[in-house]
Image (spheres, helix red, strand yellow):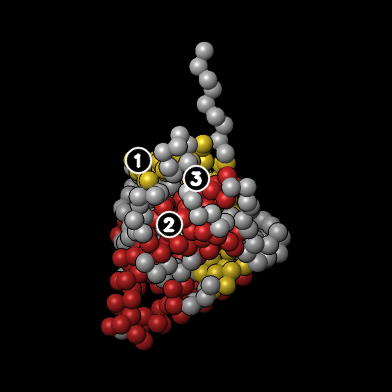
Amino acid sequence: MTNASPPPLAHAAAPAKVILLGEHAVVYGHPALAAPITAVGVEATVWPGDGAGLSIASRWPDGWTDVDVALAGDGVPMAAAVRATFARLNVEDLPSWRITVQSTIPPGRGMGSSAAVAVALVRAVAAAAGIVLDDAAVSELAMESERIVHGRPSGIDNACVAIGRPIWFEAGAIRRAPVGRTLGLVVADSGRFSSTRAMVEAVRAARTADPAGIDAVLSALGDLTVRGAAALAVGDGAALGRAMTAAHDSLRRLGVSTPDLDRLAEAAARAGAFGAKLAGSGGGGVIVAVCPPQDAARIAAACRAAGAPWTCEARLEADGPAATLGGG
């Protein structure tokens, strides 16, 4: 008779995310509104090791990645998240653990794949060490990984993923965004990889060439975030949708949309969505549409008919008043 495998030391999960309003503008101090997408996510599990050090085996939708934390250089995001967590816990010697990470988030789509991996890793490692970190600490530690992946991230991805609720993010200040009535969301993939780092740098270069013009667009995106957040707070899906559609037009003026993203946003609107826009840095990735919850399946089908290779449905659940990150 063989011995049973030892039980895991800890397990943690983290959702994907979409930016409802304010991408790119948030990099320049304007507000942004983001929401978690729990239909896809990341799970991290810590197992007892065999004495051979600390390793991470991660499974992604497009393959496997293995990391030896002790041997990984400073530019390896998963290793950075784990090391930052141990440093916060004042653990100097790496334990003999085996960590498995499984992600169902399509990478390079603006859905916070790297942030979700980092958040799940931070929470799992801390839990295996017997420590429960609050949302703010988890977000801060995950940021170490995000800087490697994205260069100069705003921090909105890891904050939204860590708190697991819609958030308002402005110049590093974070609070939960209230949701007055449950609304449906549809995410539809363009099928094209998007590099957040590359798109942020492209907007930065455009702003250098035309500061007044680009700043006007960024300011308009910030204003639309204010309008959209107010609509979300009272559950006015139609007003939120109008703000999202207008934001897509502004993002198109920034040069970060694509014909595929435009086509999917238009298909969602024709199928009855309140509004739709690209979600993330652009240049590829996904669109997000807001709609009555009962219409989500039909709108997702319309997006697939318009060429989306993958869709998912989610909900913005009604809740109570706003709270700060790390609050109850």
Establish if 238 lies above or below 268: below
Please provide percent x and percent y for residue 98: 46, 39
Indicate the secondary structure of the residue bearing disc 3: loop
Which part of the image, by quadrant, shows the C terminus?
bottom right
Alpha carbons under labels 2 and 1: distance apart: 18 Å
Q: Earlier in the sequence, mark 2 or mark 3?
A: 2
Disc assigned to residue 266:
none
Q: How many marks?
A: 3
Determine the residue positioned at 33% across, 73% down.
203
Q: Quadrant of residue 286?
A: bottom left
Indicate the secondary structure of the residue bearing disc 2: helix
Alpha carbons under labels 1 and 3: distance apart: 23 Å
Disc assigned to residue 95:
3
Determine the residue positioned at 35% across, 43% down.
65
Q: Relative to residue 144, is residue 258 drawn left or right?
A: left
Instruction: In this rendered view, identify the residue nearer to me: 92 or 175.
Output: 92
Q: Residues within 10 Å of mark 3 (few under 14, many from 20)?
A: some
The kind of residue tagged 3 is Pro
Query: Disc 2 designates what residue?
Result: 80
Disc assigned to residue 64:
1
Please provide percent x and percent y for residue 283: 32, 61
